[in-house]
Amino acid sequence: MGDRFTLDKEREVAPLPEPLTSVCIDNHAHLELITESDPDSPLIKAVLDEAASVGIDRVIQVGYSAVQSAWGVRCAEAFPGRVLAAVALHPNDAPVTADLEGDLKKIEELAQHPRVRAIGETGLDFFRTAPEGQEKQIYSFKRHIQIAKDVNKAVMIHDRDAHQAVLDTLSEVGAPEKVVFHCYSGDAAMARECVDKGYYLSFAGTVTFKNAPHLREALALAPLSQILVETDAPFLTPTPNRGLLNSPAQIPHTLRLMAQVRDINLDELCRAIVENTLRVYGEF
């Protein structure tokens, strides 16, 4: 591991999986948290090259603050054909940022950039945000939904312990044409509701965890045309590498489990996910 990128000296980078025979795309990653480097750094290129070596040849770099979203746009500019950007304020940041309106204005400006293809990750998180902060969180989510509609781009949803509130807010404001549930965390019943509304379900390494049968049930019932895959790197490393540092190169583990759950050929699954990803975000 000596010359491989690392974020934490005490957290080993997960070993590489067996390469895919068909390419696929990581629909949600935080590259700057893997390497703690500049957006055009050789370390970012190393992460992308390593992912490509196992068949993950493109990545959506996802925003969670005004400053970090600008980092993502610069990264997408630095790696055309390989990286696109999503920009937003994370739900947990909205209630505590010093200048919510100013930050939202910056997101509005970044949303116009041609390398930005989604507004995210936005949404609701009632696990980490106490009730007194939830009003600002909901306000921020509504503003992000409107930004997505104004620029005709996808909205990428962060939903933690707030399933019904997220669905209700989308219905109240009016959902954009393309809605992605990042790291889908609901059950089969919620999945049916999302599918009926035309939303996309993005599955992360959590779907491989032994304690997540509800995610596998949701995956099994979703139409193939509404499924995406992601790492949320450097978090949520899939089995068998839980506890190690995640990166886009780990997606083959998740894809192989997904193919088993759906009883589908792995290459067919990869091709469908690539088609879905390009439908949501456009060409890289």
Image (cartoon, grey):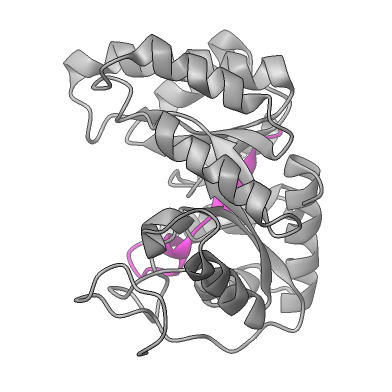
Asked which quadrant contains residue 214, the reply is bottom left
Q: Is residue 196 above or below residue 71?
A: above
In the image, residue 232 lies in the stretch drawn in magenta: no
- From the viewer's side, name the closer residue of 282 and 134: 282
- From the viewer's side, name the closer residue of 20 and 7: 7
Observer able to see residue 4? yes
Asked which quadrant contains residue 198, the reply is top right
| Residue at the spot 73% in from the left edge and 51% down from the top edge | 277
Is 218 on the left-hand or right-hand side of 38?
right
Is 167 on the left-hand or right-hand side of 27?
left
Q: Is residue 179 above or below residue 106?
A: below
Span shown in magenta: 198-211
Question: What percent of the width, then of the height, locates residue 4?
Answer: 42, 82
| Residue at the spot 23% in from the left edge and 17% down from the top edge | 133
Q: Is residue 240 above or below residue 94?
A: below
Question: What percent of the width, then of the height, locates residue 259?
Answer: 65, 73
| Residue at the spot 57% in from the left edge and 69% down from the top edge | 45
| Residue at the spot 50% in from the left edge and 74% down from the top edge | 250
In the image, residue 202 lies in the stretch drawn in magenta: yes
Question: What percent of the width, then of the height, locates residue 24?
Answer: 70, 67
Is 264 on the left-hand or right-hand side of 30?
right
